[in-house]
Image (spheres, rainbow, N blue to C red):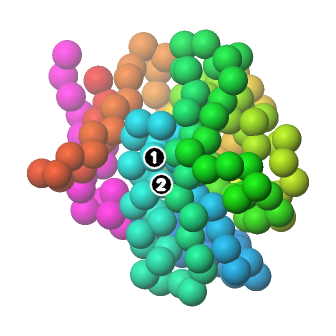
């Protein structure tokens, strides 16, 4: 299959910076914020956002990895930090690509068991093929694709990029 680059390394860097500024603006009244990345590329993207937030703001950023079995999302979701560490704090749930919304909605459900001061979602690419009522509050790009196409994000030491195949 042919790969069509939809985001270059530099474009991804710009998206990370813009999303970090949007998050800072939204959470400016908070002292601490939890950036919770969905295991895999979501946590890599979350780390990039967290690093940028620490550079541009005075927010204390707590990084969290969210583990979910994407094939069996009804199985329990777990986090790398205790729920007491994000209780009554602002939280941003981060993933690389929002496809059907299944992963994001089950992760959102997990975090709703604890009171939060604010709760937002961020994705690098929103594909607009949702089967659940979930939206990305912060997104790098919206991409209308066919269901047969696949969007892949590559985070690599040689350079990040996203492609459509």
Q: Residue furthest left?
A: 158
Q: Against 144, is 62 above or below?
A: below
Q: CA distance from mark 2 to mark 1?
A: 5 Å
Residue 81, percent across and down? 61, 50
Q: Residue at x 23, y 34 (%)?
A: 4
Q: Residues within 10 Å of mark 1 (few under 14, many from 20)?
A: many
Question: On the image, numbered disc 2 is attached to which residue?
Answer: 46
Q: Is residue 2 magenta?
A: yes
Residue 55, percent across and down? 43, 81
Q: Residue at x 61, y 41 (%)?
A: 79
Q: Which residues are magenta?
A: 1-14
Residue 80, percent across and down? 56, 45
Disc assigned to residue 85: none
Question: On the image, numbered disc 1 is attached to which residue?
Answer: 43
Q: Which element is circle 2 on? A: helix
53 relative position to 106: left or right: left
128 relative position to 27: left or right: left
Picture quarter containing residue 118?
bottom right
Which of these two is toward me, 122 or 114? 114
Q: Residue at x 54, y 20 (%)?
A: 70
Q: Is residue 13 visible?
A: yes
Q: Residue at x 71, y 29 (%)?
A: 106
The reply to whether the C-beta atoms of the residues labelled 2 and 1 are less than 8 Å apart is: yes
Q: Which element is circle 1 on? A: helix
Q: Residues within 10 Å of mark 2 (few under 14, many from 20)?
A: many
Which of these two is toward me, 74 or 20? 74
Which quarter of the image is occupied by the C terminus? top left
Picture quarter containing residue 74?
top right
Which quarter of the image is occupied by the N terminus? top left
Q: Is residue 87 magenta?
A: no
Residue 95, percent across and down? 52, 43
161 relative position to 95: left or right: left
């Amino acid at each position: 299959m042919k790969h069509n680059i939809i985001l270059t390394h530099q474009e991804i860097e710009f998206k990370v910076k813009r999303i970090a500024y949007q998050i800072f603006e939204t959470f400016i009244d908070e002292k601490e914020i939890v950036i919770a990345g969905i295991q895999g590329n979501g946590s890599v993207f979350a780390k990039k956002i967290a690093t940028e937030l620490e550079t541009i703001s005075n927010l204390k950023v707590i990084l969290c990895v969210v583990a979910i079995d994407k094939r069996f999302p009804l199985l329990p979701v777990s986090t790398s930090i205790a729920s007491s560490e994000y209780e009554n704090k602002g939280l941003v749930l981060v993933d690389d690509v929002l496809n059907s919304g299944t992963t994001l909605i089950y992760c959102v459900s997990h975090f709703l068991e604890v009171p939060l001061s604010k709760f937002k979602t961020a994705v690098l690419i929103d594909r607009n093929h949702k089967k659940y009522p979930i939206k990305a509050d912060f997104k790098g790009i919206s991409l209308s694709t066919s269901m047969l196409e696949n969007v892949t994000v590559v985070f690599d030491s040689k350079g990040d990029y996203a492609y459509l195949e």
